[in-house]
Amino acid sequence: MGLNDFMENQEKKSIDTSKKLRIGFIGCGGIAKQHIQAYLNQPDIEIVAGCDLVPGRAKKFFEKYGLENVKTDYKSHEDFLADESLKLDAVSITTYNCQHANTAIAAMKKGLHVLLEKPFTVTLDEAVEVCKVEKETGVVFTVGFQPRMDDNMKMIKKVVDSGVLGQIYYIQTGGGRRRGIPVGPEKSTFIEKETAGIGALGDIGCYSLDMVLNAIGYPKPLTVSGYTSNFFGTDPGYCKYQQIGRPDFAQKFGVDDFAAAFIRLEGGIILDFRISWAMNINTPGDTIILGTKGGLRIPSTDCWNGSVGGPMTIYHEVCGQQTETQIPIINMKENRWDLKIRTFLDAIKENTKPPVPSSQILYNQAIIDGINKSAKLGREIEIEIPEI
Ligand SMILES: NC(=O)c1ccc[n+]([C@@H]2O[C@H](COP(=O)([O-])OP(=O)(O)OC[C@H]3O[C@@H](n4cnc5c(N)ncnc54)[C@H](O)[C@@H]3O)[C@@H](O)[C@H]2O)c1
């Protein structure tokens, strides 16, 4: 493929509206809003029910979207999944991280297709269990990485696949926020061990890992030397806690707010990774992919959110001249959330591969899990991924 062939002509597909898929929600908190807005843009679905552990939250949530008839009188996801009268086809799982694996497993065992929010799970063991149930049940299961739907992200993979970089041997990736621990006056689900399980490493680290691993075909991770810390989250004087009047969140903080790692991947590739919710600098640097024929620089966003921060540059040689080729940012017409939901629905209706398969995200989770384990042990470890 030549450099000018990177732009793809996407054809518009017509949607068969003869069968409406019956959709349910497990978890009706912050991010469920993005899911429901995207579902409501689809002509071939019906939202029929939802549940949340907080009494009244699900009812309020659906009413906000004018969906008064959606059933919500459930105490738990078990109660919700036991209601056969709903005749559900699929669920969006938008619970906090510690409730990802158990809810996904329970839903799949009921024969439901599942769109699970990122990060996949908290531990590798949980991810393995989810993959086993997915295999047993044969439902469509996907993890919600909407950055994958972004044409600029797709471009990274196209550049790698074009061969212009040659053989990839080193990648530096990650992202950072100077002061960006996700809390609100009444919201601490991202920072408590019991709800989040993992911090910046899982929350935004999973995006940086996916950005580069997907581009290079998700090679198996072999070893990792990891580090995690929590200097900002555990400080009652942290500026955001002060702004929202919650210095007590420092005691609740039970996860990482910074992580770094050196990872060896199959094929002799080195992955140098760092991620932060809070640190005393603006960014830990751009993502760079080094190959034998060229290098690619992917500018980071200031507040890392899993998107390409500006035009990418390929550094290579043309007829012996050191040359830089800039790839302009593509302004997408489609909304990434609409595409995330649409590709999930299409996979169900067309019985095709899920948009973001668990077989890939298992490796992403294995790295996150490995970083945590290595950080605790204070040494490099081997990453062992059981057969599914
Ligand atoms: N893709 C993205 O861009 C994106 C952005 C933000 C958050 N997320 C992910 O979405 C998830 C949720 O984040 P959030 O901001 O909505 O959190 P949140 O705390 O606002 O909402 C989670 C909701 O799930 C409910 N819940 C938990 N366990 C449940 C269970 N077993 N049954 C029913 N309800 C249950 C909670 O009561 C809460 O209302 C997290 O895993 C987060 O990483 C993804």
Image: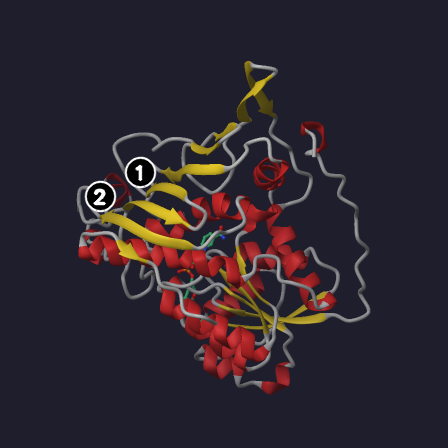
**Residue 157 visible from this viewpoint:** yes
Residue 237, quarter of picture? top left
Vertical position of residue 323 compared to residue 225: above or below: above
Mark 2 and mark 1 in contact (Cβ < 8 Å)? Answer: yes
Q: The disc labelled 2 sits on which kind of residue?
A: Phe
Report helix, strand or loop for mark 1: loop
Q: Which residue is mark 1?
A: 179
Q: Residues within 10 Å of mark 1 (few under 14, many from 20)?
A: some
Whether the residue carrying mark 2 lies under 8 Å from ligand 1 is answered with no
Vertical position of residue 9 compared to residue 50: above or below: above
Give the image location of residue 312, x and y in percent.
54, 28
Query: Marks 1/2: CA distance?
Result: 9 Å
Q: Which residue is mark 2?
A: 232
Viewer-side residue, 373 vs 26? 373
Q: At x 30% / y 45%, what residue is drawn?
A: 261
**Residue 255 visible from this viewpoint:** no
Whether the residue carrying mark 1 lies under 8 Å from ligand 1 is answered with no
Ligand 1's quadrant is bottom left
Q: The disc labelled 1 sits on which kind of residue?
A: Arg
Which of the image's four quarters has the N terminus? top right
Give the image location of residue 334, x and y in percent.
68, 44
Checking the image for residue 47, the label placed there is: none
Report helix, strand or loop for mark 2: loop
Give the image location of residue 250, x and y in percent.
20, 51
Q: At x 55% / y 75%, what residue is drawn?
A: 135
Give the image location of residue 196, x and y in percent.
34, 60
| Left or right of 152 in this view: 8 | right
Q: At x 34% / y 49%, what residue is drawn?
A: 200
